[in-house]
Amino acid sequence: MTCVSGHLTNLEFTAEHKNWSFPPPESLFNAPVISNVYQDKKNIAQNLADQARYARLLVIWTDCDREGEHIGQEIVDAAKKGNAQLQVKRARFSNIERA
């Protein structure tokens, strides 16, 4: 069992699309993007891959909202680098505490 702390990755345009004055803005709709692990999260991503080597099942327990789903997918992507055959399940839960 292990944990994460927020997003592991970010998306960036490739170098030829990072300049603010060129290319034209409309070209960004079809521009390629790359996914990078944040520098301060590289050890977490590596830990997920390492732990996955010894596992058959990964259960995602992130929040059941769009951000939680995205973080969950980042976890799956990192873990599958260590074990491509890893079975993945998604826990679904709601907090019943008063707001």
Image: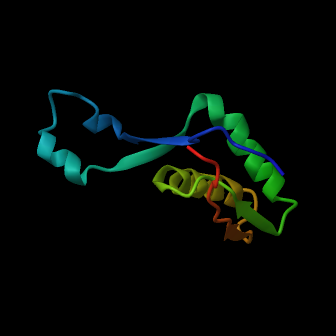
- Number of marks present in the image shown: 0
Report which quarter residue 15 is drawn in: top left
**On screen, 18 above or below 13?**
above
Residue at 74 percent of width and 69 percent of height: 86
Q: Quadrant of residue 92?
A: bottom right
Q: Is residue 78 above or below residue 57?
A: above
Residue 79 percent location from the top left of the image: 70, 56
In this rendering, would 79 be left or right of 50? left
Residue 77 horizontal/vertical position (percent): 61, 57
Which residue: 63% across, 28% down? 40
Residue lying at 80% horizontally and 47% vertically, measured from the top left: 2
Q: Quadrant of the C terminus?
A: top right
- Return the residue found at the far front: 98
Rendering colour mode: rainbow
In this rendering, the answer to whether 96 lies above or below 42 is below
Looking at this view, is 52 or 63 the one in front?
63
Q: Nearer the viewer, residue 69 or 13?
A: 69
The location of residue 33, given as percent across then percent down, is 37, 47
